[in-house]
Image (tube, grey):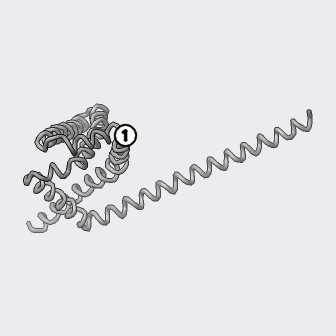
Amino acid sequence: MQRVAKKLLLFLQIILVITFIIFEELIWESIAIPIYRYLHSLKLLQRLEMFIKESINRYVILLIFIAIFIIVESAGVLAGVLIVGGYPLIGLSIYITKIPIAAFTFWLFRVSQDKLMSFKWFATAYDKLITFINWLKSLEVYKSTIKIWHSFKEYIKNIKQQIISDEEEKESSFIKGLRRIYKIFKKQI
């Protein structure tokens, strides 16, 4: 019985780790963070950032943050249900649509973090989330899976570079051919 429980625990850890890596590496790092950086660079949002920091009450910020957070998380669950339920295009569309909203939510959190953390229950929930993420990252399953993931990314990068260099060679030999033909025609004329 104890052996089955250990295997079940390992299976759950693997599922958690893979889900986390997919979220962190594919979605968050590749899509959400660039959107966040873009949003952060916009002049309009920089003015909004100052307005939020200086003028908006912490309760209003909390209400806005929680409302957006619930909408984003609900969209993620709905997307998952639709994908599993046989509507992958609709589910994927909803999930892709939620990513910029999630990036905005992340931006709002960073801008108003001091005000949000002034709520003891919010700070406790945030600390527990960070503790959980750190625990997940400390698992051997996570470390080995992330090594495999980075090796895979490096492999794909090498293939991509090889394809690009092959295309450049073809292009340069094509251009060389054009130059040769041009010189021949120029001599004839």
Indicate the quadrant containing the C terminus: top left, top right, bottom left or bottom right.
top right
The residue located at (28%, 50%) in the rendering is 23
Residue sitting at 27 percent across and 34 percent down?
A: 94
Quarter of image, res 40 = top left
Residue occupying image coordinates x 30% and y 36%: 92
In the rendered image, residue 91, in percent from the top left (x then y), is placed at 27, 35
Question: Height in image: 11 above or below 64?
Answer: below
The x, y position of residue 133, in whole percent, is 21, 59
In this image, 164 relative to 4: left or right? right
Q: Position of residue 56 (x, y in %)?
A: 17, 40
Q: Residue furthest front?
A: 54
Question: Which quadrant would the N terminus be assigned to in this image?
Answer: bottom left
Amino acid type indicated by mark 1: Leu
66 or 94, which is in the foreground?
Answer: 66
Q: Is residue 181 left or right of residue 36?
A: right
How many numbered circles does the render carry?
1
The outermost residue toward the right is: 188
Work out whether residue 78 or residue 9 is closer to the camera in this orientation and state it. 78
Residue 44, image quadrant? top left
Q: Is residue 145 left or right of residue 119?
A: right
Q: Which residue is mark 1?
A: 42
| Within-10-Å neighbours for mark 1: few <14, some 14–19, many 20+ | few
Q: Position of residue 96 (x, y in %)?
A: 31, 37
- Helix, strand or loop under label 1: loop
| Image quadrant assignment for residue 174 | top right
Residue at the image position 11 percent from the left and 64 percent from the top: 5
